[in-house]
Image (spheres, rainbow, N blue to C red):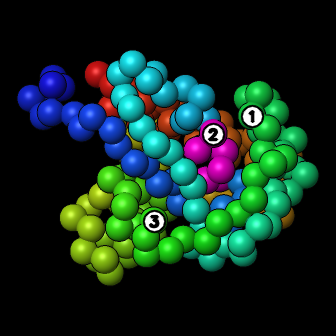
Amino acid sequence: MTKTGIEKPDRIKVLILCIGNLCRSPFAERLLKARIPSDKLDAEVFSRGTMAQRGATPTKEAIEAAKKWNIDLSDHRSHPLDLCDINTSDLILTMDSMTAETLNDLYELWDIAIPLGRFYPDYFIPDIEDPYGKGVEEYIKCYEMIEKCVDGFIQFYTE
């Protein structure tokens, strides 16, 4: 039972979603898997892309930036979003508010799609900008933002 009196589910299935499933969502997926305290929250975490090309690899900049967090993205291969992913997820974390709104409206999800930026400390960030095609420093800035949101998510769901 949480502080709010709401019971926590035994296990939740969390989908993390971005456009290409090449940098933001796989980084967030692996960071969340690494940091989530399994004794407090049992979660199955996976990532997809709304416009992902199946089997594409992250850029060298994405892989290099992730190393700052000891996360290896070199073996990641992109996966496109499908209806089964949506229907079997308990929670969908998006990188922008428009995607969350669209999913909730289009699939009548009762607000299970939430922008990851909602968990940013102190204020809401509607969009986590896509660093695709930019330099390593932009990926690092993006990953720093994702890290704060992931930590906020963990704090929210484990207290």
91 versus 87 height, above or below: above
Residue 159 is a magenta residue: no
Of the image marks 3 and 1, the number of the one nearer the N terminus: 1
In front of the other: 126 or 72: 72
Tags 3 and 2 in contact by the CB under 8 Å rule?
no
Give, as a three-letter code, the residue at label 2: Arg
- At x 67%, y 72%, the residue is 52
Mark 3 closeness class: few <14, some 14–19, many ≥20 residues within 10 Å: some
Q: CA distance from mark 3 to mark 2?
A: 18 Å
- Looking at the rendered structure, the kind of residue marked 3 is Asp
Q: Which residues are magenta?
A: 24-30
- Please name the amino acid that badge 1 sits on: Ile
Taking the view exactly as shown, the residue that stands out farthest to the left is 5
Q: Say which quadrant the N terminus sits in.
A: top left
Q: Is residue 152 left or right of residue 81?
A: left
* Point 45% across, 22% down: residue: 37
x and y percentages locating residue 61 in the rendered image: 87, 50
Mark 1 element type: loop
Residue wearing tag 1: 71
Residue bearing the label numbered 2: 30
Q: Quadrant of residue 123?
A: top left
Is label 2 in a helix, a strand or a loop?
helix
Choose between 23 and 56: the one closer to the eye.
Answer: 56
SS class, disc 3: helix
Viewed as shown, does residue 145 lie left or right of 72? left
Rounded to the nearest whole Å, what is the CA distance between mark 3 and mark 1? 24 Å
Sequence-earlier tag: 2 or 1: 2
Mark nearer the N terminus (3 vs 2):
2
Residue ID for mark 3 = 85
